[in-house]
Every structure is written in structure tokens, then in C-alpha cells.
Image: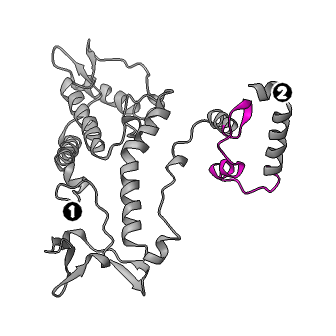
Amino acid sequence: MKVMRGDQVIALLPIDPARVTVEQNDNMSLSYRYQKPKGEAKVLAAKDIFHIRGFTLDGICGRSMVKQAAEAIGLALQAERAAARLFKNGMIVGGVLKHKGKLSPEAYDRLKASMDEREGSEQANKWMILEEAMEADTGGHSAKDSQHLETRSHQVEEIARVFGVPRPLLMVDETSWGSGIDVLGQLFVRYGLNPWFTAWEQAINRDLLSRREEDQFYAKFNAGGLLRGSMKDMADFFAKGLGAGGHHPFLHPDEARDWLELGHRDDLPVAVSKAKEANNDDPQRTQD
């Protein structure tokens, strides 16, 4: 909800979306009915609300991302609860000692004392003397346990798919961090973040700027900062943009410096002019 001073927005007050009902009036305008935690409901006009819409089916209200992933999140919660019950109530053993007959009490006491002495990380991987022809069988993950872990890992991807987050950013196992990670990062920005950048920009320009401010300001996310390549790629791009190698220049030095978050320099236009003059004086360069 907007706090106004004249025609200028000076603050935003958050309100619970679950307490808001959006209604379309006969003149196609929107009204927001807000049910206060205590007291009667309050009807607000669209000009009093800063509303950011995501994916929508009716053009009025956006669908909650959490509700879209409700089933995947619910299954992930059940898998977490199942894992908690497994570790709380299940028995986890490191191995089994087998004996064909009955172990004598003396042998049992010696074996138990020997096992107790080998507890702790300092005693790891040391050999053990078994009593009366016993056999050792090391434990391991069963196929059922592996399937349970695979289910939990799969649910992470199912939830992230709704938000457009690629697998390498999920910190799950078997994740490739090769040379293609730059391409995946660009994919995340273009298809996961850019739609939200656009929604925020349009909502800010529509709801927060007065007619007077529309001629002075506009909202823009700097997605280019997230899509920066390696320093070598950036150097090649800026060199061509500034006219190196006979390319037609399409950048101003200050534009390149802005992208690198460097300050303005008054001597750069002079240097560029001298470089252009040198190119014009070179007949081979002029012919090219």
C-alpha cells in the first residue's frame, strides 16, 4: 500500500496478500478489498496499491509461485519427514559380526571391550581380532535407501523448475561445473530472472511514478551486470565497440567505463579523436 505526499510516493507499507481480494469494477478498474486483522474491511483503489503480477490466468491476479509448486513442495516435506523418522527410529549399523554357534561369555566380554577401545576417528581402519572363528560383514546402503536419497534429490529439482533455476545452481550431487556453466548462468538470467525484472519495471513505472516524474525517471534492472563474460571477452567487445582494428565504433569510452563501474575521464575523448585522426591519415586503413 502506497503512502503519498501530494502526487509523490514516499513509502510502501506491506499488506498480507492472503487478506486482499481483487475485484474488477464495471468501468474495468480494479478495487482491492483488504480485511484488517482487527476491524472491518477497507476498500482501496488501484492507485493506492503497488501490485506486482506474476504469471496470471485472469489478467488480474498473479499465481503464487509457491502454490504452483505446492505438490512438489508437499512431496519434499514428506520425504524430509520420512528421513527424520528413519534416523529417529531406525537402526544404523556399521557392520555385523557372524558366529555359527554360541559365543561364550568370556569371548563376548573380550570382543565387546576390544570394540569399545576402537571407537573414535583415531582408531579408524585398524584391524580387529575376532573371537572363535567369527566372520565380519560390512554394512552399506541398500537399494531402498539409495532410492530414498534419489527421491529427495529429485524433489529439489522439481521445486527449482517452477522458479527457472538450473541444476548447477542447486548445489546437488553430480553437478557439472565445466565450461558450460557460463551459458547456464545466462540461461538463468534470461529465462528465470528477466521475466521478474520486466514485471518489477512495469509495476514501478505504472504505480510509483507520477506524471511529472515519468519524464525524469524510469525503472531498469541492470541485467547486463549478471551477463558479463570473462575479461578477455569483454576486452574484445569493448575494443571493437571503440573502433579498434578498423571496426566502425558504436560505443563512447564513458559507456564502456560505466559498464565496468569506472568513473568519467575528460582525457578519453581527446585520445579517441587522435586515434581516429591517425586512422584517417593511414591510406591503407582508409582503403579498408
Vertical order, 115 against 128 (above or below): below
Q: Per the image, is 255 magenta?
A: yes
Q: Nearer the viewer, mark 1 or mark 2?
A: 2
Q: Percent x, y for residue 177? A: 47, 30
Q: How is the image coloured?
A: one colour
Q: Nearer the viewer, residue 156 or 161?
A: 161
Magenta region: which residues?
241-268
Which residue does the numbered mark 1 point to in the structure image? 61
**Residue 14 left/right relative to 258:** left
Crowding around mark 2 (Cα neighbors within 10 Å: few <14, some 14 to 19, many 20+) is few
Crowding around mark 1 (Cα neighbors within 10 Å: few <14, some 14 to 19, many 20+) is some
Q: Percent x, y for residue 168? A: 41, 35
Vertical order, 70 against 121 (above or below): below
Looking at the image, which residue is at 30% across and 28% down? Answer: 94
Looking at the image, which residue is at 27% across and 45% down? Answer: 162
Which one is earlier in the sequence, the residue at label 1 or at label 2?
Answer: 1
Residue 283's disc number: 2
Residue 41's disc number: none
Q: Percent x, y for residue 175? A: 40, 30
| Residue at mark 1 to residue at mark 2: CA–CA distance | 64 Å
Secondary element at tag 1: loop
Identity, as a three-letter code, of the amino acid under mark 2: Pro
Secondary element at tag 2: helix
